[in-house]
Amino acid sequence: MKNKLNLNSIKYVYFDLDGTLLTSKKIPSLKTVEMIKKLEQKGIKCSIATGRPYFYAQNEIKIINPLLPVISCNGALMFDPIKKQVISFNEINSSKAQNIYNILIKNDAVFVLYTKEQIFMYKNNLTNPESRWLTLIKNINENFPEESRVKITIINEPEKFNITQFNIIKFLIIYSEIPAKKYQVIENEVSKINDVYIVRSQNEVFDIMPNNQSKGNGLQKLHDQGIINLNETLVFGDAENDLSMFQVAKWSVAMGNAQDKTKKIATFITKSNDEDGIATFFENLVLD
C-alpha cells in the first residue's frame, strides 16, 4: 500500500538508533543503509536522534555520514559530524545531580553518568556482582579505535565521588538489574525533584534528563536556527523518548516493534526494525 506522502515534500529525516535504525543485532541492515544513500542522492539530508551520547554512536555516524547535526543524549548534547565538535550541551543542575546521585547510591542502583566527554559507572558489588549493561557499554568502547575511545571511570568509593565537579548531561539507570521495590523508590523520589524528568528509551533502562531537553527540543532548536524546517521533516522512532520528535515534526513513522503509545501518535506505521521497516516505508511512498 502506498503511503500518502510525496517524497519531494521531504527535505530532512531523523532516525532514532536502537529499535529503529538498528536491528536487534545492533547494526543497520544493508537495505536500510542503501536506502539512506538514495535519499541523500535525491537531496534529502539525514541524521540521527538518539538517547546515546554522540561518542557512543561513532560507528553509526560513519555509516550514515549525516549532513545535519546529531541529536544525542535525548537533545541535551548536540554534535556537528562535519566539524566534529559539540555545538551545544545542557547539564543537570549540580545540586539536583547530587540529590539524584544520593538516591541512586542509597538504593543500590546500577547506573551510568554521562558528561559531554566521559562516562562514570556504578554498581554495588555485593548486590550486583555482574552487570550485562555496564559490560556491554565497556565492550563497545573497547571496540572503538584507541584514539576514539571515551574515558570510563568506575565509581568504587561512592562516598568520595564528588559529582558536582562534573557537568552531568544525563543519568542512565539500569532498572532491570535492581530489585523492583528499590526501582519504584528511585522513580518516586526522583519524580519529586524539580527541573528533571524520567524518560524510557529502551526496555530495561530509563534516563534522567534536565527539563526542556528532548529529541523534539533538539529538532526545534535546529528549526529556530534555520538548519532544518520542521514542516519538511520526517522522523522515525519506536520508544517513549521519540514522542517529542513526533510532536514537532511534520511527519512521523513508528516502527512495527514500537511501543503502543508511540504508534498511537505516529503519522505512519511501518514494519519492524528487523524487517527493514525504514527501507520498506520509503519504497511505498507516493513518488508523483
Image (spheres, rainbow, N blue to C red):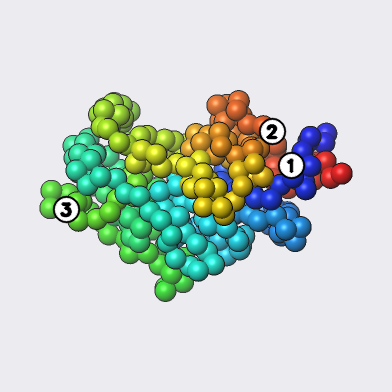
In the image, residue 269 sits, relative to residue 234, either above or below, namely: above
Q: What residue is drawn where x is 70% and y is 37%?
A: 271
Describe the element under mark 1 as helix, strand or loop.
helix
Tell me the quarter of the image containing the N terminus: top right
Q: Nearer the viewer, mark 3 or mark 2?
A: 2
Disc 2 marks which amino acid? Answer: Phe
Residue 109, image x and y in percent? 27, 39
Q: Which residue is mark 2?
A: 268
Please indicate whether residue 173 sits to the left or right of residue 73 in the image.
Answer: left
Amino acid type indicated by mark 3 = Asn
Measuring 76% from the left and 57% from the top, which residue is drawn there? 42
For residue 246, which quarter of the picture? top right
Give the Cα distance between marks 1 and 3: 48 Å
Q: Which amino acid does the dot numbered 1 rest on?
A: Phe
Residue identified by numbered label 3: 162
Residue 145 visible in the current orientation = yes
Question: Could you tell me if the residues under marks 1 and 2 are in contact, i.e. CB atoms within 8 Å?
Answer: yes
